[in-house]
Image (spheres, helix red, strand yellow):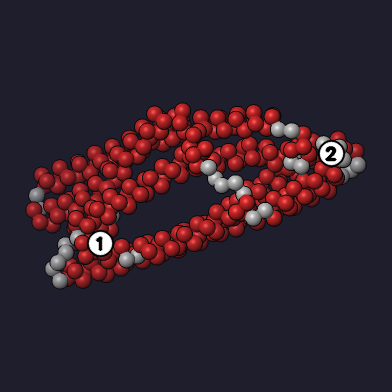
Amino acid sequence: MFEDPEQRRAAYAEARARDAATPASALPALSWRRLLAYLKPYTGHMALALVALLLSSGVSLAFPLVIVRLLDTVTQTKAYGPLNTLAGTLLGLFLFQGLFTFAQSYLLTYVGEHIVYDLRTALYAHLQQLSLDFYSVRRVGEIVSRLSSDVTQMRATLTTNITALLSQVITLIGSVVIILTLNTQLTLFILGVAPLLIAVAFVFGRRIQKVSTRVQDELAGSTVVAEEGLQGVRIVKSFGREPYEIGRYGAAMARTFRASLGMATYNALFGAVMTFLGFGAVAALIWYGGREVIAGRLTLAMISGFLI
């Protein structure tokens, strides 16, 4: 162990520089099997959450079909009975979707909190087994940041992100099947936008991933600075070094702020581009569908179903 704080800082800086110089190919690969093992004790709860997800997604996919029937009833039959029945059906679907969404959210939170508990206790137990050489080049503040902030990110990956991905895949497949049954030509026209959306998501996703990693690293660095200043507060006050420590922490937080602002910029730009493309697809659908309605090959109810 290094007793001199300056020696510890130098060793730490050398370790960080060595880590930064390590090529990506030399780093250990992310083991999804190892990560998913933390879900194994809660397989039952996760299965129920997935069932709730499937039911919620299925109900969402039924909305366009009911609305198409509802609009057709209004424009063709002009009768109150079928209209009231379909409106009641739509309200019932909204109610069931709310119940399924609540069940899914609660179960995911239950599993997620247990995973956080398991990860943190396992990581802390592992840290207790490491040698003193490890702590000579790794500062406590960074380790604490990994133990708190990074574990929370892992929880989101194993619960919220996985289910969100499944929900989007189910919705995508179900939507394509449904709109294909409604109108093949209109479906093929809309799917022409899909490659552009995928390309944009891929480009932004890679950049956001890199910036997100930098944010976590800078956050760990600022935690290290705070830990050192507070741990040695008696020495700091003895030598009147308060302004220096304040400036050091301020500089660390400024780096964290710039990294976070960079990630926010990419996220905002990604959201803006995807929103533009999404509404652009809606405008294209209205234009093409309007031509089909004028030609008598489509109805307004069908166009509304596609939009939803």
Residue beneath the point at 27% across and 48% down? 61
Residue 18 in view (yes/no): yes
* Above or below 110: residue 207: below
Residue beneath the point at 19% across and 60% down? 183
Q: Secondary structure at mark 1?
A: helix
Residue beneath the point at 13% across and 68% down? 296
Q: Which mark is residue 187?
A: 1
Describe residue 84's horizontal placement relative to residue 213 as left or right. Answer: left
Give the farthest residue toward the right.
Answer: 239
Residue ID for mark 2: 2
Seen from the viewer's position, the closer of residues 29 and 71 is 29
Eye-nearest disc, 2 or 1:
2
Give the farthest residue toward the front.
Answer: 26
Residue 95 image offset from top left, x and y in percent: 28, 38
Seen from the viewer's position, the closer of residues 86 and 264 is 264
Residue beneath the point at 82% across and 43% down? 8
Residue 219 image offset from top left, x and y in percent: 66, 47
Residue 304 in view (yes/no): no
What amino acid does circle 1 point to?
Thr
Residue 202 image offset from top left, x and y in percent: 47, 59
Q: How far is disc 2 from disc 1 in space, using C-alphas?
A: 67 Å
Seen from the viewer's position, the closer of residues 41 and 284 is 41
**Mark 1 nearby-residue class (10 Å; few <14, some 14–19, many ≥20):** some
Q: Which mark is residue 54?
A: none
N-terminal of the pair, mark 2 or mark 1, is: 2
* Above or below 105: residue 168: below
**Mark 2 nearby-residue class (10 Å; few <14, some 14–19, many ≥20):** some
